[in-house]
Image (cartoon, grey):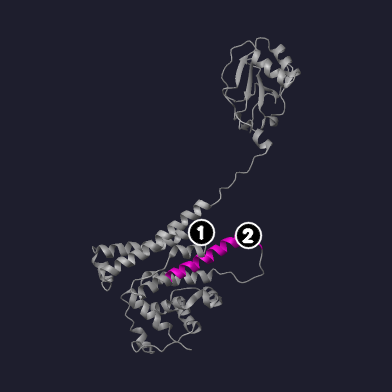
Amino acid sequence: MGRPKRTAKYKQSKSAEAAYQIESEIDLSLALNHLNQEREIKDMLPWIYDYMARNDYTRQQIAAVKAAPDWKIGTTACALAHLINLGCNVPARAGERVKRVIETCINLKPVETPVIKPATTTYVKSSVKAETAMEDLEQALDEFVQNGFQSTFKPFDLFKRYDVKAKYAQKIIQYYSRLQEELIIAVAGNNPEVNEGYSHITKANLKRYLSFVSLIINDAQSIASVKKAVRRTRKPKEKSLQQLTQKLSYLKESPLYKVASVDPQKIIKAQTVILFNTKYRKLTVLQAQSEAGLSISRTTIVNIDEQQSFSKRLRKPEQSLKEILSNGKIYVQKYVKGINAQPGPVTGRMNEDTIILRVF
């Protein structure tokens, strides 16, 4: 079955089309419905090509739109372009919709042999879904006006269906916030110019219009919050032992005391480290604060238990160093605790005078 014939209000002549009086959203919807009657998309595409020619688009850009799939352009964008070409006073958002459709078609990539690039593919899919969601929102807004400012449409369900990401949800919010601000002024009735533009809509319908647009914005904000909340936190890349120890300052060997440092990489995840400062004859014992062990941050040994760690000044360093280096773990731990000297606090900070004696 074909589409129903046009009403008597609009005739098929160009002079009748030029007589469209667009003074409200309802007038715009009626004009769009009239232009869509008994026309196929192929009959309406020349209107958008004409619009591009009138607005200084290049031949290459027009060719790109012609190469785009018909469904990507759509009958609504073609009809809006035609009304603009006729000099009708269409809302600003209608002109923006035509430009957005054209830009989308221009940026379409030609169909080629698929190349597996996960990141790029995901980005393109998300972008296409967001653009389709915007088109559905515009359609829902048109139907809302046509149905006497009533609708059961739920924007949040639409956003979930198209898996709109937080980035694109912010663009939707920005786009409809301009209309929301204008409607707030119209409801308040304080601006004569805005009042005149919306004089054909009753106060009650203006409030419904504002509520519907606000619903779109609020649901877009909600979906953006949900997407941010479920976004996985990127796990920091674990540094290698060489990276952790490359800036550590220590004394490799001491000819005076005839001792040498062990490999500083052994400190990572160790439970105990014994250090000796050759300049001040200070012995330092560092204990880890957890089973994760000790670690290194630039020039400092970190994750130490300050209550269990201590430092002592050695009266006879040669004898103490011999005992520490020549015995096992349990004996050494008892020995350092039994050294007759006043224990002092520790910081874990290393320098070029410090020997790394033992690591357990």
Residue 330 can be seen in this image = yes
Mark-to-mark CA distance, 2 and 1: 17 Å
Q: Residue 160 in the image: x percent, y percent?
A: 50, 62
Q: Residue 237 in the image: state x and y as whole percent.
A: 63, 44
Disc 1 target residue: 165
- Residue at 53% across / 78% down in the picture? 70
The answer to whether 180 is drawn above or below residue 274 in the figure is below
Query: Eyeballing the image, is 346 above or below 100?
Result: above
Mark 2: give few (<14), some (14-19) or many (20+) Cα within 10 Å.
few
Quadrant (top left, top right, bottom left, bottom right) of the C terminus = top right
Q: Give the range drawn in magenta.
A: 116-138
Image: 302 above or below 81? above
Asked if residue 90 can be seen in this view, the reply is no
Q: Return the residue at label 2.
A: 118
What residue sits 61% from the left and 30% below the top? 290
Q: Specify the principal SS of the magenta part.
A: helix
Residue toward you, 157 or 251: 157
